[in-house]
Image (cartoon, grey):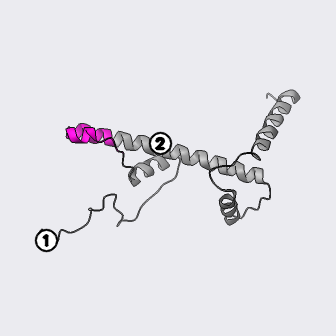
Amino acid sequence: MNHPTNEGRHDDDTALSDFLASLMDYTPTIPDELVEHYIAKSGFQCPDVRLIRLVAVATQKFITEVATDALQHCKARQTGAVKDKRDKQQKQDKRLTLTMDDLSKALCEYGVNMKHQEYFADNPSVGMESTSRDE
């Protein structure tokens, strides 16, 4: 077994202390009050702002990674659709449409299984009956 030396442990402690101190000057995207609310809702009380901000930074990183992965799924899906249809107009349309399927696939990679209700549709016209063409 390799035990860390006292000097190595001191360096790690110093780096951790410096990082925690830097959190006092950092304003995360997710407000402290929101993080405190959800931490309290889970049954954890924490008066230390540094720990609250550490949770906020970790949450922000997680959300960013999920959003980036969902974007990659979206790009792959839409690239495949353009190749299938070979439509020039669709090739010119550079807008991306993020769907729940893209988000679900990205979250699944992180162990979060997301199922939506059966009545949910990514396209507003799905499930609508055509009443009459005169309307």
Q: Quadrant of the C terminus?
A: bottom left
Tag 2 residue: 69
Residue 3, magenta (yes or no): no
From which residue to which does the magenta span run? Answer: 78-96
* Numbered disc 1: secondary structure: loop
Residue located 22% across and 41% down the image: 89
| Viewer-side residue, 21 vs 1 | 21
Tag 1 residue: 132
| Foreground tag (2 vs 1) | 1
Residue 125 location, x and y as percent?
A: 26, 62
Q: Quadrant of the N terminus?
A: top right
Q: Amino acid at mark 2?
A: Asp
Question: Is residue 51 shown above or below 22?
Answer: below
Q: Amino acid at mark 1?
A: Ser
Q: Is residue 9 left or right of residue 72?
A: right
Residue 80, magenta (yes or no): yes
Q: Is residue 119 left or right of residue 103?
A: left
Measured Cα–Cα span from mark 2 to mark 1 = 42 Å
Question: Is residue 69 shown above or below 134?
Answer: above
Discs 2, 1 touching: Cβ within 8 Å: no
Residue 79 location, x and y as percent?
A: 31, 38
Residue located 67% across and 64% down the image: 37
